[in-house]
Image (cartoon, rainbow, N blue to C red):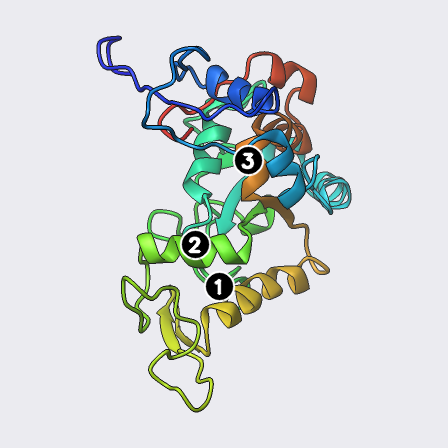
């Protein structure tokens, strides 16, 4: 809300008591919710706890966190440990950066230092494929500033179906589609055979052609999966950032030497504009 005089009002279609978990998330984000007996005819459906569990499981998934963090801590001195966000377009990379910045708990690490532990993105560019950019390319302002080996990539992964749909709303690259026919994985004008819609994506050092949105998603994340056997990489689901924010951010902070998860969860701050 702005100055208390223009509050966001969210109407919820309540479903017995299953709304409770999602309601708590919105309340912690300081978004006012109407009481059950004051529901307007304009109802915004929000997922129940059961809806979320059915689609993404009841608990957050950080599959390689323990191994990646242990390796990173062994090879990187504490004062030099940093964490940088990476991910495809439209996957919530800005959201993760903002959550880390707002809930940082690392003693004796200055935000004014070039080796500040929470980098907005990996030094070689958060959207760039690692195989052709890490250790070779630097985004503007990061040239020679930090040793890229001291930055732990935290890769945000959004489930492919919703990721493809989100590209229909916010276009970061061009591919053949129409507003009423999107994401258009195959050319809908071809009736005889299925023809994938190919396109190009321009990165920092190169331009790549992909056969389809599915190929882009698989190829881009496949590189990080492959590289995770050579250097530490942490994978975070976008959906866990939404529904399990406190736990995930706590684990990431603890990973590079911050406060324990429980302490971070106690004073956790949500982002109202993103909730």
Q: Residue at x 61, y 12 (%)?
A: 266
Q: Secondary structure at mark 1?
A: loop
Contact (Cβ within 8 Å) of mark 2 with mark 1: yes
Mark 2–mark 3 Cα distance, whole angstroms, equals 21 Å
Instruction: Give x and y (percent) for residue 166.
Output: 40, 52
Q: Is residue 230 left or right of residue 267?
A: right
Q: Residue at x 36, y 74 (%)?
A: 200
Mark 2 vs 3, N-terminal side:
2
Q: Residues within 10 Å of mark 2 (few under 14, many from 20)?
A: many
Taking depth in this image into account, of 25 and 210 the one nearest to the observer is 25
From where the camera sits, is residue 265 visible? yes
What residue sits right under mark 2 in the picture?
125
Mark 3 vs 1, N-terminal side:
1
Determine the image quadrant of residue 226.
bottom right
- In the depicted structure, whether residue 112 falls above or below residue 174: above
Determine the image quadrant of residue 154.
top right
Mark 2 vs 1, N-terminal side:
2
Q: Which mark is residue 32?
A: none
Mark 2–mark 1 Cα distance, whole angstroms, equals 8 Å
Q: Which mark is residue 241?
A: 3
Q: Residue at x 39, y 72 (%)?
A: 206
Q: Secondary structure at mark 2?
A: loop
Q: Secondary structure at mark 3?
A: helix
């Amino acid at each position: 809300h702005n100055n208390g005089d223009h509050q966001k009002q969210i109407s919820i279609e309540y479903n017995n008591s299953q709304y409770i978990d999602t309601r708590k998330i919105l309340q912690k984000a300081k978004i006012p919710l109407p009481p059950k007996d004051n529901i307007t005819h304009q109802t915004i459906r929000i997922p129940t706890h059961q809806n979320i569990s059915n689609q993404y499981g009841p608990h957050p998934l950080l599959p390689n966190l323990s191994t990646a963090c242990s390796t990173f801590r062994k090879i990187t001195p504490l004062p030099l440990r940093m964490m940088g966000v990476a991910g495809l377009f439209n996957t919530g990379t800005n959201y993760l950066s903002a959550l880390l910045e707002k809930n940082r708990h690392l003693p004796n690490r200055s935000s004014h230092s070039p080796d500040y532990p929470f980098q907005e993105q990996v030094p070689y560019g958060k959207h760039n494929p690692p195989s052709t950019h890490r250790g070779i390319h630097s985004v503007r302002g990061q040239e020679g500033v930090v040793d890229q080996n001291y930055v732990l990539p935290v890769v945000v992964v959004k489930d492919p179906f919703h990721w493809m749909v989100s590209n229909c709303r916010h276009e970061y690259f061009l591919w053949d589609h129409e507003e009423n026919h999107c994401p258009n994985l195959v050319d809908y004008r071809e009736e005889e055979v299925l023809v994938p819609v190919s396109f190009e994506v321009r990165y920092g050092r190169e331009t790549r052609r992909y056969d389809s949105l599915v190929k882009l998603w698989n190829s881009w994340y496949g590189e990080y999966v492959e590289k995770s056997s050579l250097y530490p990489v942490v994978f975070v689901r976008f959906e866990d950032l939404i529904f399990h924010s406190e736990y995930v951010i706590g684990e990431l902070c603890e990973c590079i030497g911050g406060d324990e998860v429980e302490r971070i969860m106690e004073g956790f701050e949500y982002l109202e504009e993103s909730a």
